[in-house]
């Protein structure tokens, strides 16, 4: 009811950017071009969005680990 197409597309692109930034397969996230797990990526992926620009980085401090 409060959803907009722009917001949904922004979230969809953020999901794709996060998936592309991980050069590995882990859990349900499988990549045929990177089929192995890499411990370098054993951290949460943080994404920021600012005026159309996406930036990802790994949470190596594990502040967002559940």
Image (cartoon, rainbow, N blue to C red):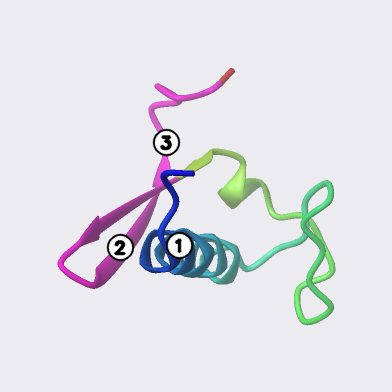
- Disc on the earlier residue, 3 or 1: 1
- Give the foreground label among 3 and 1: 1
- Give the foreground label among 2 and 1: 1
The residue most toward the top is 66
At x 30%, y 62%, the residue is 55
Question: In the rendered view of the protein, which quadrant contains the C terminus?
Answer: top right
- Disc on the earlier residue, 3 or 2: 2
Q: Position of residue 40 (x, y in %)?
A: 58, 50
* Dominant secondary structure (helix, strand or loop) of the stretch shown in magenta: strand
**Residue 55: which numbered mark, if any?**
2
| Residue 63, placed above or below residue 30 | above
Q: Nearer the viewer, residue 40 or 58?
A: 58
| Residue 39, placed above or below residue 31 | above
Do tag 3 and tag 2 residues touch (Cβ < 8 Å)? no
Q: Position of residue 48 (x, y in %)?
A: 29, 53
Badge 3 marks a residue whose secondary structure is loop
**Residue 14: which numbered mark, if any?**
1
Label 3, on which residue? 60
| Residue 2, placed above or below residue 49 | above
- Disc on the earlier residue, 2 or 1: 1
The residue most toward the bottom is 33
**Residue 26: which numbered mark, if any?**
none
Q: Position of residue 16 (x, y in %)?
A: 56, 69
Q: Is residue 58 magenta?
A: yes
Q: Which residues are magenta?
A: 46-65
């Amino acid at each position: 009811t409060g959803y907009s197409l722009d917001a949904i597309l922004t979230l969809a692109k953020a999901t794709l950017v996060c998936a592309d930034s991980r050069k590995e397969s882990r859990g349900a996230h499988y990549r045929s071009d990177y089929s192995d797990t890499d411990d370098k990526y054993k951290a949460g992926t943080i994404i920021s969005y600012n005026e159309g620009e996406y930036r990802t980085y790994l949470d190596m401090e594990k502040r967002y680990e559940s």
